[in-house]
Amino acid sequence: MTHSFAFVTDTHLDDAFTRSHQVPAREDLILLLQEIAGKGIREVVIGGDIGEPSSHSFLFDALKQHTPDYKVILGNFDKLEDVRQHYHPPGLVDGTMCYSEDRDGFRYIFLDSSSEVLYDAQLQWLEQELKTAGKVLLFVHHPVVEIPVLVDGLQPLQGREKIKALLLKHPHAVYVFCGHLHITDQRQEQNIHQTVTPATSAQFIKEAAGLEIDLSYFGYSIITLTGDTVTTEIVRWERDR
């Protein structure tokens, strides 16, 4: 059995970042959702940094129209009280939006990193959730495995080494899907397979010494589960097409 879903992150709808760079964030999001739906994919995970609260109605209306089966995690620009006006969190841990579900032989874990640090209650919850016999899909806005680029050092998830230690103890593969950095990156550290999905807004140039913006493309990821095998495709949408 094969099951595919999309990971869309860092839309930054209507916020200062996209407006200052004249990014047509709303139009780009619709293009991606239409393309995802056109591939027969009806399930999407929104990876955080949605945008201004005034844009949330637009986002959730678009999701209901194009990809009605969706989950949400929060980024460092998101606030739970804003998002929950449009999305009922499947679970809360000490006031943070953390939840999980078991499907397709995998445990899906959705982790709230909006405060840029994981509190003790979240770490304890994560440790319990990792007590599963199967492989794990972990969705979190911030990368867990460190990436040697400038932007990762500027706004890292504080204490992420504690998260990584928990993941490394898991007896099976753990697949981490994140955003935050506005770059594309895929790397493995022991049993941890981490994919950083490009933003649906603007990218940072990965190799640059400073924070240089790349407006030439935006993108998303498609995750496909075939039995117990996980494959990830990074999809780039060139803005001049």
Image (tube, rainbow, N blue to C red):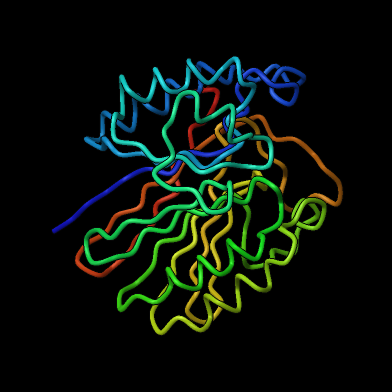
94 with respect to 209 (left or right) = left
Image position, residue 29 (x, y; %): 48, 24
Give the residue at x 57% y 48%. Answer: 96
Horizontal and vertical percent position of residue 193? 48, 69
Q: Quadrant of residue 172?
A: bottom left
Q: Residue at x 60, y 63 (%)?
A: 121
Direction left: furthest residue? 1
Camera-side residue of 20 and 157: 157
Which residue is at the far right? 210
Give residue 102's position: percent from left, percent from top.
Answer: 28, 60
Image point 34% across, 61% down: which residue?
A: 231
Q: Is 224 above or below relative to 238?
A: below
Seen at 43% across and 30% down, the residue is 87
Direction from residue 142 to residue 222 in the image, left or right: left
Query: Looking at the image, is 203 positioned above or below residue 194?
Result: above
Q: Position of residue 176 (x, y in %)?
A: 49, 61
Image quarter where the N terminus lies is bottom left
**What is the count of numbered marks?**
0
